[in-house]
Amino acid sequence: MKRFIVVVLALVLLISFTLSSRAASPRKLVQPWSKLKSLSDEQRERIYQIHRKALADMKAIREQERKEIVALLSDAQKVELVESEEKSAVQRKKEAAADRMPTTAAATQSADAADEER
């Protein structure tokens, strides 16, 4: 029983140490800020936080823009938009598959071409 308690305490200490070291380590920055080698950990953390906030703000702006534009569309235009977005998503997935497996992509493109001919 004592051995079990010691093992559990050791695991708790190990986990807490790992979590605290992750929190204390500076975050990975994007360029050009990552190129600056003389930044302090505090500066790196602040830059990281500013960048994260800017990304969140830009996402909110894009979502608001889309919401306002979609509100202007007729029902038929909304359907057309959804169809266009679905077609784009399928195309992106095919291209991603082609990048992963060139031989499979060639077979898929041949099958697509055969389907279009029919």
Image (cartoon, rainbow, N blue to C red):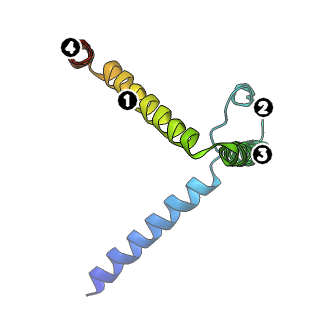
Label whose residue precedes the other's in the sequence (2 or 4)? 2
Image x and y of residue 64, in percent:
72, 48
Q: Residues within 10 Å of mark 2 (few under 14, many from 20)?
A: few
Element class at badge 4: helix
Quarter holding residue 87: top left
Residue behind mark 3 = 50
The residue pinned by badge 2 equals 38
C-alpha distance separating marks 1 and 2: 41 Å
- Find the distance from the CA under tag 2 to the CA under tag 4: 59 Å
Marked residue nearer the N-terminal end (3 or 2): 2
Between circles 2 and 4, the one closer to the viewer is 4
- Most distant residue in the bottom direction: 1
Image location of residue 17, percent across then percent down: 52, 62
* CA–CA distance in space, label 3 to label 4: 51 Å
* SS label for mark 2: loop
Q: Answer with mark 1 or mark 2, whichever residue precedes in sequence.
A: 2
Q: Which residue is mark 1?
A: 93
Query: Does 74 sit left or right of 106 as displayed?
Result: right
User: Is 10 rendered above or below residue 50?
Assistant: below
* Along the viewing direction, whichever of 44 and 8 lies nearer the viewer: 44
| Callout in the foreground (4, 1) | 4
Choose between 54 and 15: the one closer to the eye: 54
Quarter of the image that includes the C terminus = top left
Q: Quadrant of residue 98?
A: top left
Residue nearest the observer in this picture, 65 or 59:
65
Look at the numbered discs 3 and 1 and tell me whether their residues touch, using CB distance below 8 Å: no
Give the amino acid at mark 2: Ser
